[in-house]
Amino acid sequence: MSDIIETSEFLEQIAFQLIAHAGEARSNVFEALTKVIEGKNKEAKELIKKADDELVLAHKAQFDLITREARGNPVEPTILLVHAQDILMASLTEKALAEKIIDIYESLKSMIQKNV
């Protein structure tokens, strides 16, 4: 019975690490978009870097989970764990899109300035 509790606590800990780090990454990404609109491109890029750092930590937590399963300790998915994975995947997608939006915004701004 203690193995089940230990496994449950481990999975809960991993899920909360994923949620915390991926959630912080999302916050940084959306703040970066706001900064680029305000013309604060350097700050925007710093926030994207912070998002990257948070996603590295989230990936580490995910890797711990994958390693556990690869070593023969099967992982029973819970709603919390599925939710955590969903937040991580959303954060990765949003970061990639934000980087492209920032690039587009900077390109448009540059083109407009050349034509003025």
Image (cartoon, rainbow, N blue to C red):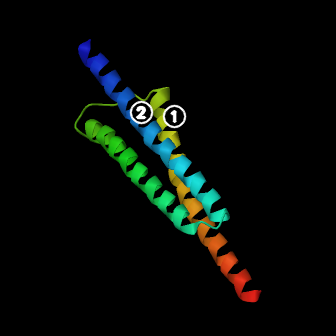
Taking 66 as reference, is 90 left or right? Answer: right
- Circle 1/circle 2 CB separation < 8 Å: yes
Whole-percent x and y of residue 16? 42, 32
Q: Which mark is residue 13?
A: none
Please, what is the three-letter code of the amino acid marked with disc 2?
Answer: Ala
Q: Secondary structure at mark 1?
A: helix
| Farthest top residue in view | 1
Taking 36 as reference, is 19 left or right? Answer: left
- Which of the pair 16/27 is nearer the observer? 27
Residue at which label 2 appears: 15
Residue visible at 33% across and 46% down in the picture: 60
Q: Quadrant of residue 99?
A: bottom right
Whole-percent x and y of residue 66? 32, 41
Q: Is residue 25 visible?
A: yes
In the rendered image, the quadrant that contains the N terminus is top left
Q: Earlier in the sequence, mark 1 or mark 2?
A: 2
**Label 2 packing within 10 angstroms: few (<14), some (14-19), many (20+):** many
Residue at which label 1 appears: 83
Taking 95 as reference, is 34 left or right? Answer: right
Please, what is the three-letter code of the amino acid marked with disc 1?
Answer: His
Q: Quadrant of residue 14?
A: top left
Above or below residue 75? Residue 6 is: above
Above or below residue 13? Residue 37 is: below
Q: Is residue 88 visible?
A: no
Q: Secondary structure at mark 2?
A: helix
| Farthest left residue in view | 71
Q: CA distance from mark 1 to mark 2?
A: 8 Å
Residue visible at 62% across and 64% down in the picture: 36
Whole-percent x and y of residue 45? 51, 64
